[in-house]
């Protein structure tokens, strides 16, 4: 029901002062999900989006009431163009000397290829955290090789939202901001068409995404273990749908753990004669 009421042309508040500011394009092969965290007059943008989506993302940021000059940090959880491509445009519009980029040093060398203008900080040098002026804290959790060497995820201690980067992402030809995976899915094997929603099963899209994007089972399992240790209200991935309940999170974790071939192993299994 939540999905039926949503206006994807506007920013959407997914938790207290946490906004989805992405672009829904039904013709795109995959949906990108930038997120804005607002704390008083201070704001942080996570995985800001690609170049083509910049105008939509910035318009939605403005609709939250945030002055772009109050964005003090751009967090990039890895270095792919789908989240870093708009960086030069972000810098120009924000136009603040206080602006800094937070990532990992393994990523920052590549992020410099988008722009070397803004100072770049490594999460390790920050003791794996960022504190707003109010004391609100973001925690950074390293998830190496899920899917890049410098990959990490971000946890908002105030709302307990976990921004999971590519982990939990999915291909979905019938996208919705909130997942259509429900409690009854726990006892169902993923089918092409879901008998409950009569739509394409989202678990299939999540499987296919991880088989192609994640380089190894070991890296994914390591990341899932760290995620399970956190008290999470909802999981907000960079691609695909948000997982807002414990049961949907548990179902998807179990389904991801069932994968035995990822990356090169998946490729070789499907291409060796």
Image (cartoon, rainbow, N blue to C red):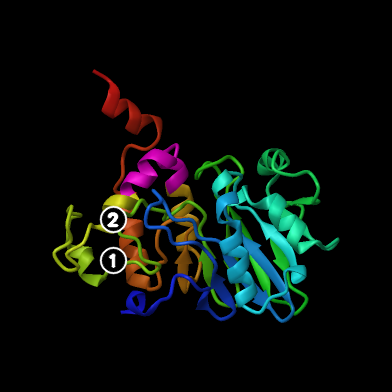
Q: What percent of the width, then of the height, locates residue 132?
A: 74, 73
Residues in magenta, as a range = 207-220
Q: Is the magenta stretch mostly helix, strand or loop?
A: helix
Q: Mark 1 points at which residue?
A: 181
Q: Which residue occupies 41% across, 56% down?
A: 168
Q: Does the image show residue 75?
A: yes
Q: What percent of the width, then of the height, locates residue 256?
A: 34, 51
Q: What percent of the width, then of the height, locates residue 159?
A: 56, 77
Quadrant occupied by the N terminus: bottom left
117 vs 47: above or below? above
Q: Which residue occupies 56% across, 51% down?
A: 52
Q: Considering the numbered disc 1 on the image, is that residue within a helix, a strand or a loop?
A: loop
33 vs 144: above or below? below
Name the outermost residue toward the left: 195
186 lies left or right of 55: left
Name the outermost residue toward the top: 273
Is the Cβ of the residue at disc 2 closer than 8 Å to that at disc 1? yes
Q: Considering the numbered disc 2 on the image, is that residue within a helix, a strand or a loop?
A: helix
- Mark 2 Cα-neighbour bin, 10 Å: few <14, some 14–19, many ≥20: many
Q: Mark 2 points at which residue?
A: 203
């Amino acid at each position: 029901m939540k999905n039926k009421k949503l206006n994807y042309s506007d920013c959407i508040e997914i938790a207290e002062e946490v906004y989805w500011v992405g672009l829904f394009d039904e013709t795109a092969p995959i949906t990108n999900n930038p997120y804005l965290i607002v704390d008083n007059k201070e704001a942080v943008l996570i995985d800001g989006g690609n170049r083509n989506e910049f105008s939509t993302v910035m318009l939605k940021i403005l609709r939250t009431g945030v002055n772009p000059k109050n964005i003090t940090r751009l967090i990039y959880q890895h270095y792919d163009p789908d989240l870093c491509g708009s960086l030069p445009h972000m810098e120009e519009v924000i136009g603040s000397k206080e602006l800094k980029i937070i990532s990992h040093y393994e990523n920052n060398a590549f992020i410099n290829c988008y722009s070397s203008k803004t100072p770049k900080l490594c999460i390790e040098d920050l003791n794996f955290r960022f504190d707003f002026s109010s004391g609100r804290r973001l925690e950074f959790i390293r998830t190496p090789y899920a899917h890049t060497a410098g990959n990490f995820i971000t946890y908002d201690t105030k709302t307990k939202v976990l921004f999971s980067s590519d982990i939990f992402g999915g291909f979905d030809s019938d996208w919705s901001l909130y997942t259509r995976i429900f409690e009854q899915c726990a006892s169902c094997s993923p089918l092409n068409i879901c008998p409950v929603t009569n739509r394409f099963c989202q678990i299939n899209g999540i499987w296919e995404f991880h088989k192609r994007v994640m380089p190894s089972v070991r890296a994914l399992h390591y990341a899932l273990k760290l995620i399970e240790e956190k008290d999470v209200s909802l999981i907000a991935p960079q691609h695909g749908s948000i997982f807002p309940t414990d049961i949907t999170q548990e179902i998807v974790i179990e389904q991801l753990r069932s994968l035995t071939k990822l990356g090169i192993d998946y490729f070789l299994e499907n291409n060796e004669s």
